[in-house]
Image (spheres, helix red, strand yellow):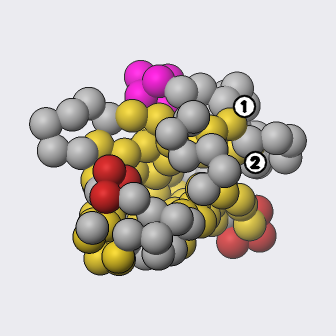
Amino acid sequence: QVQLVESGGGLVQAGGSLRLSCAASGRTFSSGAQGWFRQAPGKEREFIAAIRWSGGNPNYADSVKGRFTISRDNAKNTVYLQMNSLKFEDTAVYYCAARRLSRLATMTSEYDYWGQGTQVTVSS
């Protein structure tokens, strides 16, 4: 089993920045990929970004491209999501996910492990 724990959420004004962290523990793997998703009230969980543990270009949703950056620290088994120029519509619970395969999947069903989520609230 793999455990994922998110941190770094909070309240920020529009235009501000936050950095989310996702620490993995348990039976971690050197291959595979991790992603970030978010879910706003009354909406489905949506893909934000994904990155391979082995490197290569990440994948981003169009809604966050140019504002959010996903990165990883393999030594710490941690993936980060740097969020800049935050907008009110970025308000949601943000989830970290991991999958054993390395393809940068964008669907929730393609991920094997999930964190508990961290709330991000952007005030307008």
Disc 1: which residue:
102
Residue at 82% from the left image edge and 41% from the top image edge: 57
For the residue labelled by badge 2, is the local secondary structure a helix, a strand or a loop?
loop
State which quadrant residue 67 falls in. bottom right
User: Contact (CB < 8 A) between labels 1 and 2?
Assistant: yes
Q: Nearer the viewer, residue 16 or 77?
A: 16
The vertical placement of 54 against 104, above or below, is below
Q: Residue 59 in the image: x percent, y percent?
A: 68, 36
Question: Looking at the picture, does residue 115 appear above or below residue 98?
Answer: below
Q: Residue at x 46, y 51 (%)?
A: 96
The crowding category of the residue bearing disc 1, from other C-alpha atoms within 10 Å (few below 14, some 14 to 19, many at least 20), is some
Residue type indicated by callout 1: Ser
Q: Which residues are magenta?
A: 107-112
Reading the chain from its start, which is encountered first: label 1 or label 2? 2
Name the amino acid, label 2: Trp
Q: Residues within 10 Å of mark 2 (few under 14, many from 20)?
A: many
Q: Where is residue 14 drawn, in percent x and y? A: 38, 69
The residue indicated by pointer 2 is: 53
Residue 1 as seen in the image, left or right of residue 88? right
Left or right of 77, for residue 120: left
User: Residue drawn 46% across and 70% down?
Assistant: 15
Distance from the alpha carbon under mark 1 to that under mark 2? 8 Å
* Rendered view: 49 above or below 91: above
Q: Quadrant of the C terminus?
A: bottom left
- On the question of residue 76 being in view, the answer is yes
